[in-house]
Image (tube, rainbow, N blue to C red):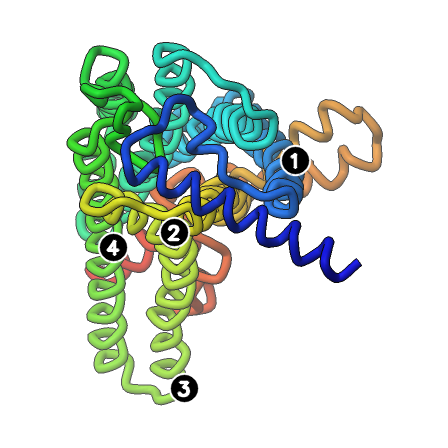
Amino acid sequence: MVELKGSAYLDFADAEENASSQIGNGSCDSLECYMVLTKLEKTAIGTICFLTGPVTLMENALVLGVIATSVVLRQKPSYLFIGSLALADFFASWFFTMSFLDFHLFHRSDGPTAYLFKLGGVTMAFSSSVGSLLLTALDRYLCIHQASSYKVLLTRQRALLSLLVLWSITIFISSWPLMGWRCPTDLSPPCSRLFPYISRGYLACWTTFILVLLALILVAYSLILWKAHRHESSMTSLQGAAGTGQARMRMDIRLARTFGLILLILVGSWLPVLTFMLVDVSIILTHTQQRAFAFCGTLCLVNSAVNPLLYALRCRELRLALLQSLQRVCGFGKCKKCTKDLDPGMHSAGDNCAEVSDDEKLGARTTQLDSISEIVNNQSS
Protein backbone atom coordinates (compact mmCIF):
# COMPACT_ATOMS: atom_id res chain seq x y z
CA MET A 1 0.00 0.00 0.00
CA VAL A 2 2.82 2.38 0.88
CA GLU A 3 4.59 1.50 -2.36
CA LEU A 4 1.47 2.30 -4.38
CA LYS A 5 1.12 5.70 -2.72
CA GLY A 6 4.81 6.39 -3.26
CA SER A 7 4.64 5.42 -6.92
CA ALA A 8 1.54 7.59 -7.44
CA TYR A 9 3.34 10.55 -5.92
CA LEU A 10 6.38 9.94 -8.11
CA ASP A 11 4.18 9.69 -11.20
CA PHE A 12 2.53 13.02 -10.32
CA ALA A 13 5.91 14.65 -9.73
CA ASP A 14 7.30 13.28 -12.98
CA ALA A 15 4.24 14.45 -14.90
CA GLU A 16 4.50 17.93 -13.43
CA GLU A 17 8.20 18.08 -14.16
CA ASN A 18 7.59 17.04 -17.76
CA ALA A 19 4.83 19.63 -18.14
CA SER A 20 7.08 22.33 -16.70
CA SER A 21 9.89 21.33 -19.03
CA GLN A 22 7.49 21.45 -21.98
CA ILE A 23 6.58 25.05 -21.20
CA GLY A 24 10.19 25.92 -20.56
CA ASN A 25 11.24 24.37 -23.87
CA GLY A 26 8.42 26.10 -25.77
CA SER A 27 6.58 22.87 -26.72
CA CYS A 28 3.13 23.87 -25.40
CA ASP A 29 0.80 22.54 -28.07
CA SER A 30 -2.55 23.15 -26.32
CA LEU A 31 -4.17 25.01 -23.44
CA GLU A 32 -3.53 22.05 -21.16
CA CYS A 33 -0.20 23.64 -20.29
CA TYR A 34 -2.22 26.26 -18.35
CA MET A 35 -4.57 23.78 -16.65
CA VAL A 36 -2.23 23.04 -13.78
CA LEU A 37 -4.52 22.66 -10.77
CA THR A 38 -4.56 19.42 -8.83
CA LYS A 39 -7.81 17.72 -7.81
CA LEU A 40 -7.65 19.14 -4.30
CA GLU A 41 -6.92 22.62 -5.60
CA LYS A 42 -9.83 22.39 -8.04
CA THR A 43 -12.13 21.52 -5.15
CA ALA A 44 -10.91 24.44 -3.07
CA ILE A 45 -11.10 27.02 -5.86
CA GLY A 46 -14.41 25.64 -7.08
CA THR A 47 -15.87 26.03 -3.60
CA ILE A 48 -14.64 29.63 -3.36
CA CYS A 49 -16.09 30.54 -6.76
CA PHE A 50 -19.40 28.73 -6.29
CA LEU A 51 -19.92 30.49 -2.96
CA THR A 52 -18.53 33.94 -3.70
CA GLY A 53 -19.79 34.29 -7.28
CA PRO A 54 -23.57 34.11 -6.60
CA VAL A 55 -23.26 36.20 -3.42
CA THR A 56 -21.37 38.91 -5.32
CA LEU A 57 -23.92 38.80 -8.13
CA MET A 58 -26.90 39.22 -5.77
CA GLU A 59 -25.23 41.93 -3.65
CA ASN A 60 -24.41 44.15 -6.59
CA ALA A 61 -27.75 43.47 -8.28
CA LEU A 62 -29.45 44.66 -5.08
CA VAL A 63 -27.38 47.86 -5.01
CA LEU A 64 -28.10 48.55 -8.67
CA GLY A 65 -31.81 47.95 -8.13
CA VAL A 66 -32.00 50.31 -5.15
CA ILE A 67 -30.15 53.12 -6.95
CA ALA A 68 -32.16 52.64 -10.15
CA THR A 69 -35.51 52.81 -8.34
CA SER A 70 -34.63 55.82 -6.15
CA VAL A 71 -35.10 59.22 -7.77
CA VAL A 72 -33.09 60.92 -5.01
CA LEU A 73 -30.05 58.65 -5.35
CA ARG A 74 -30.01 58.81 -9.15
CA GLN A 75 -29.54 62.57 -8.98
CA LYS A 76 -26.39 62.43 -6.84
CA PRO A 77 -22.94 61.91 -8.41
CA SER A 78 -21.73 59.93 -5.39
CA TYR A 79 -24.34 57.24 -5.94
CA LEU A 80 -23.80 57.24 -9.69
CA PHE A 81 -20.20 56.25 -8.99
CA ILE A 82 -21.34 53.61 -6.50
CA GLY A 83 -23.76 52.33 -9.13
CA SER A 84 -20.94 52.11 -11.65
CA LEU A 85 -18.90 50.15 -9.13
CA ALA A 86 -21.81 47.78 -8.53
CA LEU A 87 -22.31 47.30 -12.27
CA ALA A 88 -18.62 46.50 -12.79
CA ASP A 89 -18.58 44.04 -9.89
CA PHE A 90 -21.80 42.49 -11.20
CA PHE A 91 -20.10 41.83 -14.53
CA ALA A 92 -16.96 40.62 -12.76
CA SER A 93 -18.86 38.08 -10.68
CA TRP A 94 -20.48 36.69 -13.82
CA PHE A 95 -17.60 36.80 -16.32
CA PHE A 96 -14.82 35.76 -13.93
CA THR A 97 -16.71 32.92 -12.27
CA MET A 98 -17.94 31.39 -15.51
CA SER A 99 -14.65 31.77 -17.38
CA PHE A 100 -12.47 30.67 -14.47
CA LEU A 101 -14.48 27.55 -13.67
CA ASP A 102 -14.94 26.71 -17.34
CA PHE A 103 -11.21 26.81 -17.94
CA HIS A 104 -9.61 25.44 -14.78
CA LEU A 105 -12.25 23.01 -13.55
CA PHE A 106 -13.98 21.82 -16.72
CA HIS A 107 -10.90 22.14 -18.98
CA ARG A 108 -12.71 23.84 -21.83
CA SER A 109 -10.23 24.57 -24.62
CA ASP A 110 -11.45 27.49 -26.71
CA GLY A 111 -9.84 28.92 -29.79
CA PRO A 112 -7.85 32.16 -29.62
CA THR A 113 -10.80 34.42 -30.51
CA ALA A 114 -13.24 32.82 -28.05
CA TYR A 115 -10.69 32.76 -25.25
CA LEU A 116 -9.63 36.37 -25.77
CA PHE A 117 -13.28 37.46 -25.90
CA LYS A 118 -13.94 35.86 -22.50
CA LEU A 119 -10.72 37.28 -21.07
CA GLY A 120 -11.67 40.71 -22.43
CA GLY A 121 -14.93 40.59 -20.48
CA VAL A 122 -13.08 39.79 -17.26
CA THR A 123 -10.50 42.50 -17.94
CA MET A 124 -13.18 45.08 -18.71
CA ALA A 125 -15.13 44.27 -15.55
CA PHE A 126 -12.18 44.44 -13.16
CA SER A 127 -10.72 47.53 -14.85
CA SER A 128 -14.05 49.34 -14.56
CA SER A 129 -14.32 48.25 -10.92
CA VAL A 130 -10.96 49.78 -9.99
CA GLY A 131 -11.73 52.84 -12.12
CA SER A 132 -15.05 53.34 -10.32
CA LEU A 133 -13.23 53.11 -6.99
CA LEU A 134 -10.96 55.91 -8.21
CA LEU A 135 -13.93 58.08 -9.17
CA THR A 136 -15.46 57.44 -5.75
CA ALA A 137 -12.20 58.47 -4.06
CA LEU A 138 -11.98 61.62 -6.21
CA ASP A 139 -15.58 62.44 -5.36
CA ARG A 140 -14.78 62.33 -1.66
CA TYR A 141 -11.60 64.33 -2.25
CA LEU A 142 -13.56 67.12 -3.97
CA CYS A 143 -16.19 66.95 -1.25
CA ILE A 144 -13.76 67.78 1.53
CA HIS A 145 -11.25 69.99 -0.34
CA GLN A 146 -13.82 71.98 -2.34
CA ALA A 147 -16.83 71.75 -0.05
CA SER A 148 -18.21 75.20 -0.84
CA SER A 149 -18.14 74.68 -4.62
CA TYR A 150 -18.63 70.92 -4.70
CA LYS A 151 -22.05 70.98 -6.33
CA VAL A 152 -20.80 73.36 -9.00
CA LEU A 153 -17.66 71.36 -9.77
CA LEU A 154 -19.29 67.93 -9.82
CA THR A 155 -22.72 68.05 -11.40
CA ARG A 156 -24.75 65.04 -12.44
CA GLN A 157 -23.91 65.66 -16.08
CA ARG A 158 -20.18 65.76 -15.37
CA ALA A 159 -20.45 62.59 -13.31
CA LEU A 160 -22.20 60.79 -16.16
CA LEU A 161 -19.59 62.08 -18.59
CA SER A 162 -16.75 60.81 -16.39
CA LEU A 163 -18.43 57.39 -16.21
CA LEU A 164 -18.82 57.34 -19.99
CA VAL A 165 -15.12 58.14 -20.41
CA LEU A 166 -14.14 55.50 -17.85
CA TRP A 167 -16.14 52.69 -19.41
CA SER A 168 -15.04 53.68 -22.91
CA ILE A 169 -11.37 53.52 -21.88
CA THR A 170 -11.72 50.18 -20.10
CA ILE A 171 -13.64 48.59 -22.98
CA PHE A 172 -11.08 49.91 -25.46
CA ILE A 173 -8.09 48.64 -23.47
CA SER A 174 -9.72 45.26 -22.88
CA SER A 175 -10.35 44.79 -26.60
CA TRP A 176 -6.71 45.28 -27.66
CA PRO A 177 -5.91 41.53 -27.77
CA LEU A 178 -8.99 40.92 -29.91
CA MET A 179 -7.92 43.77 -32.18
CA GLY A 180 -4.54 42.14 -32.81
CA TRP A 181 -2.22 42.84 -29.89
CA ARG A 182 -1.63 39.22 -28.98
CA CYS A 183 1.27 36.82 -28.72
CA PRO A 184 2.86 36.56 -32.20
CA THR A 185 3.84 32.91 -31.63
CA ASP A 186 0.51 31.84 -30.07
CA LEU A 187 1.51 28.78 -28.00
CA SER A 188 4.76 27.80 -29.70
CA PRO A 189 6.21 29.15 -27.50
CA PRO A 190 3.67 30.99 -25.33
CA CYS A 191 4.47 34.58 -24.41
CA SER A 192 2.73 34.50 -21.02
CA ARG A 193 2.59 31.57 -18.62
CA LEU A 194 -0.55 32.98 -17.00
CA PHE A 195 -2.77 33.82 -19.98
CA PRO A 196 -2.71 32.02 -23.34
CA TYR A 197 -2.33 34.13 -26.49
CA ILE A 198 -1.51 37.28 -24.43
CA SER A 199 1.66 39.17 -25.26
CA ARG A 200 3.99 40.35 -22.55
CA GLY A 201 3.70 43.93 -23.77
CA TYR A 202 -0.06 43.99 -23.28
CA LEU A 203 0.21 42.28 -19.91
CA ALA A 204 2.74 44.87 -18.74
CA CYS A 205 0.58 47.71 -20.08
CA TRP A 206 -2.61 46.55 -18.36
CA THR A 207 -0.81 45.83 -15.08
CA THR A 208 0.74 49.30 -15.11
CA PHE A 209 -2.67 50.83 -15.82
CA ILE A 210 -4.23 49.14 -12.77
CA LEU A 211 -1.24 50.05 -10.58
CA VAL A 212 -1.59 53.71 -11.57
CA LEU A 213 -5.29 53.64 -10.66
CA LEU A 214 -4.51 52.09 -7.28
CA ALA A 215 -1.78 54.67 -6.64
CA LEU A 216 -4.19 57.52 -7.40
CA ILE A 217 -6.73 56.02 -5.00
CA LEU A 218 -4.09 55.91 -2.26
CA VAL A 219 -3.13 59.53 -2.93
CA ALA A 220 -6.75 60.71 -2.85
CA TYR A 221 -7.50 59.06 0.49
CA SER A 222 -4.21 60.29 1.94
CA LEU A 223 -5.13 63.87 1.03
CA ILE A 224 -8.56 63.41 2.59
CA LEU A 225 -7.01 62.21 5.84
CA TRP A 226 -4.49 65.08 5.81
CA LYS A 227 -7.27 67.63 5.34
CA ALA A 228 -9.38 66.05 8.09
CA HIS A 229 -6.45 65.97 10.51
CA ARG A 230 -5.56 69.59 9.82
CA HIS A 231 -9.18 70.62 10.30
CA GLU A 232 -9.40 68.76 13.60
CA SER A 233 -6.19 70.35 14.87
CA SER A 234 -7.44 73.85 14.05
CA MET A 235 -10.84 73.22 15.62
CA THR A 236 -9.22 71.87 18.78
CA SER A 237 -7.23 75.09 19.22
CA LEU A 238 -10.37 77.18 18.65
CA GLN A 239 -12.62 75.26 21.01
CA GLY A 240 -10.40 75.55 24.07
CA ALA A 241 -12.45 73.07 26.06
CA ALA A 242 -10.50 69.91 26.69
CA GLY A 243 -13.48 67.59 26.57
CA THR A 244 -14.77 68.97 23.30
CA GLY A 245 -11.33 68.93 21.77
CA GLN A 246 -10.80 65.29 22.66
CA ALA A 247 -14.16 64.42 21.16
CA ARG A 248 -13.33 66.25 17.95
CA MET A 249 -9.87 64.77 17.68
CA ARG A 250 -11.49 61.36 17.32
CA MET A 251 -12.89 62.23 13.88
CA ASP A 252 -9.64 61.94 11.92
CA ILE A 253 -8.86 58.72 13.78
CA ARG A 254 -12.22 57.31 12.73
CA LEU A 255 -11.58 58.37 9.15
CA ALA A 256 -8.14 56.75 9.26
CA ARG A 257 -9.64 53.54 10.58
CA THR A 258 -12.35 53.46 7.92
CA PHE A 259 -10.08 54.34 5.01
CA GLY A 260 -7.37 52.04 6.34
CA LEU A 261 -9.79 49.13 6.16
CA ILE A 262 -10.83 50.10 2.64
CA LEU A 263 -7.25 50.40 1.39
CA LEU A 264 -6.10 47.25 3.18
CA ILE A 265 -8.78 45.17 1.46
CA LEU A 266 -8.16 46.84 -1.89
CA VAL A 267 -4.38 46.47 -1.88
CA GLY A 268 -4.50 43.00 -0.31
CA SER A 269 -6.84 41.80 -3.05
CA TRP A 270 -4.98 43.25 -6.02
CA LEU A 271 -1.29 43.38 -5.12
CA PRO A 272 -0.64 39.58 -5.23
CA VAL A 273 -2.23 39.23 -8.67
CA LEU A 274 -0.44 42.25 -10.11
CA THR A 275 2.87 41.04 -8.66
CA PHE A 276 2.53 37.69 -10.44
CA MET A 277 1.71 39.49 -13.69
CA LEU A 278 4.79 41.69 -13.45
CA VAL A 279 6.95 38.66 -12.71
CA ASP A 280 5.40 36.81 -15.66
CA VAL A 281 6.55 39.59 -17.96
CA SER A 282 10.20 39.10 -17.02
CA ILE A 283 10.69 35.39 -16.22
CA ILE A 284 9.16 31.99 -16.96
CA LEU A 285 6.80 30.95 -14.17
CA THR A 286 6.72 27.40 -12.83
CA HIS A 287 3.58 25.32 -12.37
CA THR A 288 3.66 26.02 -8.65
CA GLN A 289 3.62 29.75 -9.32
CA GLN A 290 0.80 29.30 -11.84
CA ARG A 291 -1.28 27.49 -9.23
CA ALA A 292 -0.56 30.21 -6.67
CA PHE A 293 -1.72 32.80 -9.19
CA ALA A 294 -5.00 30.94 -9.64
CA PHE A 295 -5.70 31.23 -5.92
CA CYS A 296 -4.69 34.89 -5.89
CA GLY A 297 -7.09 35.53 -8.75
CA THR A 298 -10.01 34.57 -6.54
CA LEU A 299 -9.07 37.46 -4.21
CA CYS A 300 -10.23 39.89 -6.89
CA LEU A 301 -13.62 38.17 -6.86
CA VAL A 302 -13.71 38.39 -3.06
CA ASN A 303 -12.95 42.12 -3.36
CA SER A 304 -15.96 42.51 -5.65
CA ALA A 305 -18.06 40.79 -2.98
CA VAL A 306 -16.80 43.13 -0.24
CA ASN A 307 -17.20 46.37 -2.23
CA PRO A 308 -21.01 46.64 -1.75
CA LEU A 309 -20.54 46.32 2.01
CA LEU A 310 -17.79 48.97 2.15
CA TYR A 311 -19.11 51.55 -0.30
CA ALA A 312 -22.88 51.05 -0.67
CA LEU A 313 -24.56 49.50 2.36
CA ARG A 314 -22.56 51.69 4.78
CA CYS A 315 -24.30 54.77 3.33
CA ARG A 316 -27.38 55.73 5.31
CA GLU A 317 -29.30 57.13 2.36
CA LEU A 318 -28.93 53.91 0.41
CA ARG A 319 -30.01 51.83 3.40
CA LEU A 320 -33.10 54.01 3.78
CA ALA A 321 -33.88 53.63 0.09
CA LEU A 322 -33.48 49.87 0.50
CA LEU A 323 -35.96 49.88 3.38
CA GLN A 324 -38.40 51.88 1.25
CA SER A 325 -38.04 49.37 -1.57
CA LEU A 326 -38.63 46.49 0.82
CA GLN A 327 -41.71 48.27 2.14
CA ARG A 328 -43.08 48.59 -1.39
CA VAL A 329 -42.36 44.93 -2.07
CA CYS A 330 -43.73 43.45 1.15
CA GLY A 331 -46.67 45.87 1.41
CA PHE A 332 -47.32 45.06 5.07
CA GLY A 333 -48.40 47.64 7.62
CA LYS A 334 -45.55 46.77 9.97
CA CYS A 335 -43.05 47.86 7.32
CA LYS A 336 -44.95 51.06 6.64
CA LYS A 337 -44.46 52.57 10.08
CA CYS A 338 -40.70 51.84 10.09
CA THR A 339 -40.17 53.42 6.68
CA LYS A 340 -42.38 56.38 7.48
CA ASP A 341 -40.28 57.21 10.50
CA LEU A 342 -37.13 57.10 8.40
CA ASP A 343 -38.35 59.33 5.57
CA PRO A 344 -37.26 62.64 7.19
CA GLY A 345 -33.74 61.31 7.43
CA MET A 346 -33.72 60.72 3.71
CA HIS A 347 -34.67 64.31 2.91
CA SER A 348 -32.48 65.89 5.56
CA ALA A 349 -29.49 64.06 4.15
CA GLY A 350 -30.13 65.50 0.71
CA ASP A 351 -27.44 68.13 1.11
CA ASN A 352 -24.69 65.62 1.88
CA CYS A 353 -22.23 65.28 -0.97
CA ALA A 354 -20.38 62.12 0.09
CA GLU A 355 -21.43 60.19 3.13
CA VAL A 356 -18.65 57.71 3.78
CA SER A 357 -20.02 55.78 6.77
CA ASP A 358 -21.92 56.10 10.00
CA ASP A 359 -18.65 56.00 11.94
CA GLU A 360 -17.69 59.40 10.53
CA LYS A 361 -20.37 61.36 12.39
CA LEU A 362 -18.95 63.91 14.77
CA GLY A 363 -20.55 65.72 17.69
CA ALA A 364 -19.09 69.20 17.28
CA ARG A 365 -22.13 70.74 18.89
CA THR A 366 -25.38 69.16 19.98
CA THR A 367 -26.20 68.48 16.31
CA GLN A 368 -24.24 65.64 14.72
CA LEU A 369 -22.50 66.07 11.38
CA ASP A 370 -23.62 63.56 8.77
CA SER A 371 -20.89 63.94 6.16
CA ILE A 372 -17.37 65.16 5.55
CA SER A 373 -18.67 68.14 3.61
CA GLU A 374 -20.58 69.45 6.64
CA ILE A 375 -17.42 69.19 8.75
CA VAL A 376 -15.54 71.38 6.28
CA ASN A 377 -18.44 73.80 5.96
CA ASN A 378 -18.54 74.26 9.73
CA GLN A 379 -14.85 75.11 9.72
CA SER A 380 -15.50 78.22 7.64
CA SER A 381 -18.51 79.34 9.72
* Residue 251 locus on image (x, y percent): 37, 69
Q: CA distance from mark 4 to mark 3?
A: 32 Å
Looking at numbered disc 4 in the image, what kind of residue is underneath it? Leu
Q: Are marks 4 and 1 in contact (CB under 8 Å)?
A: no
Q: Nearer the viewer, mark 4 or mark 3?
A: 4
The local secondary structure at tag 3 comes to: helix
User: Which comes sooner in the sequence, label 4 or label 1?
Assistant: 1
Q: CA distance from mark 4 to mark 2?
A: 10 Å
Q: Amino acid at mark 3?
A: Gly
Label 4 belongs to which residue?
Answer: 218
Give coordinates of residue 220: x percent, y percent. Answer: 22, 52
Amino acid type at image mark 2: Leu
Earlier along the polypeptide chain: callout 2 or callout 3? 3
Q: Residues within 10 Å of mark 4 (few under 14, many from 20)?
A: some
Q: Nearer the viewer, mark 4 or mark 2?
A: 2
Q: Compute the Cα span from label 2 to label 3.
A: 36 Å
Disc 1: which residue: 50
Q: Residue at x 49, y 24 (%)?
A: 95
Viewer-side label of 3, 1 = 1
Q: Secondary structure at mark 2?
A: helix
Quick one: quadrant of the C terminus?
bottom left
Q: Nearer the viewer, residue 194 or 316?
A: 194
Question: In the image, which is nearer the foreground, mark 2 or mark 3?
Answer: 2
Q: CA distance from mark 4 to mark 1?
A: 31 Å
Q: Quadrant of residue 333?
A: top right
* Viewer-proximal residue among 202 and 317: 202
| Residue 266: mark in rendering | 2
For the residue pair 167 and 48, the one nearer the viewer reads as 48
Badges 2 and 1: C-beta atoms under 8 Å apart? Answer: no
Number of numbered tags placed on the structure image: 4
